[in-house]
Image (cartoon, rainbow, N blue to C red):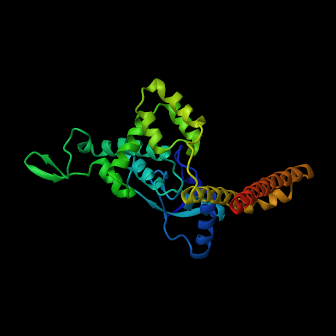
Amino acid sequence: MQIKISEIKINPGRRDTQQRNVEELARSIAAVGLMNPVTVTQDNTLIAGLHRLEAAKLLGWTEIECTVSDADGLQAELAEIDENFVRAGLSHRELGDLLLRRKELYEAIHPETRQGQRNGQTAKNDNLTVLAAKPFSEDTADKLGISKRTVERLVQTAANLTPEAKKTIRDAGDKITKGDALKISRLPPDQQAEAAAVLTIAPPTPKKQGMMDSEAALREFTSLCSRYVSGIKSLHHRAGIFAGMSISQFDALGNSAYSVTTAIKEFFEKVHEIRHEMENEHEN
């Protein structure tokens, strides 16, 4: 059924959309139409399809085709979390927090799967044997295509980390690995934030030069460039705003762009300088 986009509610705390994906989806919808309706609850709260909804807004639609689900309350939130699992770019901390909340919901809906209850595919009900839900870790592992052990470790980490340690880990980006986060979560609460902070400032472990180091550096550089290009492309639909800027704003825009090209130029000059020195040493 068609529902006015203005009447669709989005729960707070839901993950942001990725602008490039929204724009690509909008182009696809404009060409072939909306192939899969978004899913909402009976009170028009979005369960699945945030990128499709944002693409429709970008196209100027006022209504969108929706599937109204009977799921409500815990079931609806569980379905929304499962929708978030398909998003690209989830950090291990974000994934762990999602899994922890999914565990709470799943075990509230299927209390027979809680630890200490019957752990199997069947449960006794008076004199009858009835089919029971899978344990949380098994159900989640099947949905995500990862091991049960990975699910359990991510949930353990999310459950045991203090809010302060989580914030430090989130701000640290790639400096703190999934394994580091697990180790921090096993420390006493009053030691976690300090341990996480130490990892953010500790110098990197020296590595031997070799093909693996080169490939890792190349992936990092390529990823950085890809994010930059993606970010610039996401501004294309706002080019008119930039064109209407004042002289001082346009100068600031040019200076920012020039600083990027200068940084790239200086980087390659440094690389070529070191490469030239290495070639000279090899010849001698």
Q: Nearer the viewer, residue 9 or 273?
A: 273
The residue depicted at 21 percent of the width and 46 percent of the height is: 119
Indicate the position of residue 266 as horizontal and vertical percent values. 79, 54
Left or right of 246, for residue 105: left
Q: Residue furthest bottom?
A: 32
Indicate the position of residue 115 as horizontal and vertical percent values. 25, 39
Q: Residue furthest left?
A: 127
Q: Is residue 1 above or below residue 84?
A: below
Q: Nearer the viewer, residue 33 or 16?
A: 16
Residue 206 seen: yes
The residue depicted at 45 percent of the width and 54 percent of the height is: 85
The residue depicted at 47 percent of the width and 31 percent of the height is: 162
Left or right of 265, for residue 37: left
Q: Residue furthest right?
A: 247
Q: Quadrant of the C terminus?
A: bottom right
Q: Nearer the viewer, residue 120 or 191?
A: 191
Q: Residue furthest top?
A: 190
Total numbered labels = 0
Indicate the position of residue 65 as horizontal and vertical percent values. 52, 65
Q: Is residue 177 above or below residue 225?
A: above
Q: Nearer the viewer, residue 106 or 163?
A: 163
Residue 62 seen: no
Indicate the position of residue 275 as horizontal and vertical percent values. 72, 59
Left or right of 79, for residue 148: left
